[in-house]
Amino acid sequence: SKPTQSIDLILMSTTLTTQADSGSSDERGVEHQSDCHYSGTVVFLWKMKFQLLSLSLALLLPRFHALSTPAVVSTPKAPISPLADFDFNTNKKLPWMEGGYQTWKWKDHDINYIEMGDPSKPAIVLIHGFGASAYHWRYNIPDLAKDYHVFAFCKLGFGLSSKPVQEYAPEVWRDQAVDFLKEVVKKPATLAGNSLGGFTSLYAAATDEAKSLINGVVLLNGAGRFRDSQPEEVKEVNPFVEKIQTAIQRMVIGASFIFTKQPARISQILKQVYPINADNVDEELVESIRFPSLDPNAAEVFYRVITKNGSGPGVYIDDLLANLECPLLLCWGEYDPWIRPQAADKVQALYPAAQRVSIDAGHCPHDEAPEAVNQAIRNFVNSHST
């Protein structure tokens, strides 16, 4: 370095000067003190050079070490779940989080989902009904997670999942459920669905490509149409009349959406279908339905879902049961004002191998009577899981 080079020059000149002066000291009569002066200067400069060399090494060694050490490539860490600190062994109820829980990318859409429990245990996938979300399983997920690997997702267009403006035929949610099993669960699972979610569960289980992924289905007051003994009458459609009917229908459904999404109205409707234990209709449940309705696309999605599925999905339960090859449990709220117990009777007639458990509850037995439903699901899963 330049400082040490400068000291080298001074040392050389000082040493030569000292030698020259030392050789002629007798002739000039220089005193011995002069020799001591030059010797002290040389020692001082040698010390400075040594210190500068040490300093240079101290500065250069870390750089050399950095160049000789292979660079460590840091891998991005998986996002921490908002439920990371949630203890399902001590908490019976999930917290409502409007920011969502976990996200699965499906066909460029964000799908909100919840995963809880030991991955080595049998898997259960819970599918909500119309207007609800994964949070509707708030009392079931923590309890079932003690013994199973539990999942619940928000269907496309509902809850905290994306709400694209598109057609919402039953096949959309069937495909979503099948892909969720393939991409997220990645092992055979029991599907349990409420209302429209029950139909989705049954539709997925009756699909050939998914049969190896589904080892059981639980219908909790499942929705759907039965094949009528009489063929449907084919009506001639007048395009002009159809446009008027569509406009009126859109206006009526739009007004209904604005009215229905009010917290007081949500609470009123829920209490009608929670006839035994209306106390479970609390602020968190109401908010979990109200908050998603604030999405800019929510009203249009509501209209499209209603017009496409309002009279029941276009696929018949009869046909799905005819293609079903796995165990089936009917976990039925016997006081449902919307889907009567007679619907469960029809399912049993079409699928005699189905088991049935009656629950003292209405349309949403899993949330109104969660303890009874959780026990029924446990018994069913334990009876057929390997």
Image: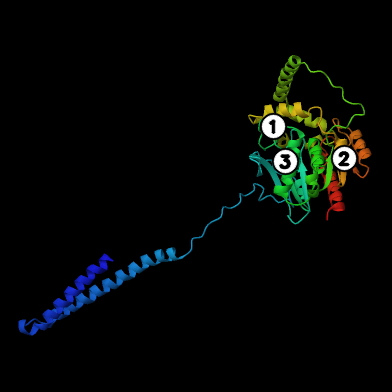
Can you identify the residue that label 2 sits on?
321
Amino acid at the residue labelled 3: Gln
Lower sequence index among marks 2 and 1:
1
Reading the chain from its start, which is encountered first: label 2 or label 3? 3
Work out whether residue 115 can be spotted. no
Query: Which amino acid lies under the numbered mark 2 shown in the image of this protein?
Result: Leu
* Quadrant housing the N terminus: bottom left
Left-right relation of 181 to 362? left
As shown in the figure, which amino acid type bears the numbered disc 1?
Arg
Q: Which mark is residue 176?
A: 3
352 left or right of 269? right
Image coordinates of residue 290 in percent, x first then y, are 69, 32
Q: Residue furthest bottom?
A: 26
Up the image or down, 80 lies above or below 346; here it is below
Q: How is the image coloured?
A: rainbow
Q: Are marks 3 and 1 in contact (CB under 8 Å)?
A: no
**Is the Cβ of the residue at disc 2 closer than 8 Å to that at disc 1?**
no
The answer to whether any part of residue 146 appears in the image is yes
Task: Tell me if label 2 and label 3 are in contact, CB under 8 Å.
Answer: no
Mark before the other along the chain sequence, 3 or 1: 3
Cα–Cα span, label 3 and label 1: 23 Å
- How far apart are the alpha carbons under marks 2 and 1? 34 Å
